[in-house]
Image (cartoon, helix red, strand yellow):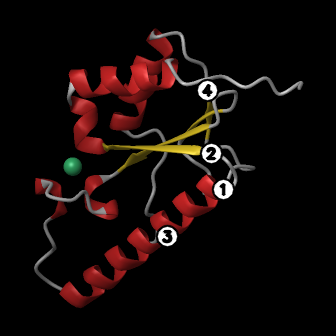
Amino acid sequence: MAKVRSRDTGPELAMRRALHAAGLRYRLHSRDVPGHPDIVFRSRRIALFIHGCFWHRHPGCKATRVPKSGISFWLGKFEENMARDRKVEASLVTAGWNVIVVWECEVLNPALVADVVAQIRHAPQFSRRR
Ligand SMILES: [Zn+2]
C-alpha cells in the first residue's frame, strides 16, 4: 500500500500519446521540479499530473468509493494524499510553474484530452537562454 503513484500507467501513456501526436515534447518525472510531476513542459513552465481518481480523490467521481473495511485507515491515507497534492501544487506555483491536473477517468474522454493538449500548445514559451 506504500506505493501511491505508479509510473507508465495506461491513462498516463494515453495522455502522452496525445501530447506526442500534437507535436509537444516533454520530460517525465523530472527530479528537479517540485513534486516530480508526471509530465513537464519546461519551456512553457507547465507541470502536468495524471491523478489516479481513487488515490487522489477525484471530486464526484465513481472511482472514489471508500473500501468497506479499515475505513479510518483509508480516510487517513486519502487525507495524506490530498494534503501532499496541495503542498506540491503550492510549491510549484511559488516556483513559477503552471499546474494542470488531469484525472485518470478524464483521459478516456477524447474531447477533454484535446482541450488539455490545446491549452498546453497555446501556452507561452519562455526561452531559457534569456
Ligand atoms: Zn475520476
Q: Quadrant of residue 26?
A: top right
Nearer-N-terminus badge (4/3):
4
> Quick check: marks 3 and 2 in contact, CB under 8 Å?
no
Q: Is mark 3 within 8 Å of ligand 1?
A: no
Nearer-N-terminus badge (3/1):
1
Nearer-N-terminus badge (1/2):
1
Residue identified by numbered label 4: 26
Question: What separation in Å lies between label 4 and label 1 (alpha carbons)?
Answer: 16 Å
Q: Is residue 96 left or right of residue 83?
A: right
Q: Is mark 4 within 8 Å of ligand 1?
A: no
Question: What separation in Å lies between label 4 and label 3 (alpha carbons)?
Answer: 24 Å
Residue drawn at (57%, 47%), measured in percent from left and top? 37
Q: Quadrant of residue 40?
A: top right
Q: Is residue 15 left or right of residue 125?
A: left
Nearer-N-terminus badge (2/4):
4
Crowd around label 4: few <14 · some 14–19 · many ≥20 (10 Å): many
> Quick check: marks 4 and 1 in contact, CB under 8 Å?
no
> Quick check: marks 1 and 2 in contact, CB under 8 Å?
yes
The front one of 79 and 130 is: 130
Looking at the rendered structure, which numbered label has been put on residue 97?
Answer: 2
How many numbered marks, from 0 up?
4
* Kind of element beneath mark 3: helix
> Quick check: marks 3 and 1 in contact, CB under 8 Å?
no
* Image location (x, y in percent) of residue 83: 44, 74
Residue identified by numbered label 1: 34
Residue identified by numbered label 3: 84
Kind of residue at disc 1: Pro
Crowd around label 1: few <14 · some 14–19 · many ≥20 (10 Å): some
Q: Is residue 65 left or right of residue 78?
A: left
* Image location (x, y in percent) of residue 67: 15, 74
Nearer-N-terminus badge (4/1):
4
Kind of residue at disc 4: Tyr
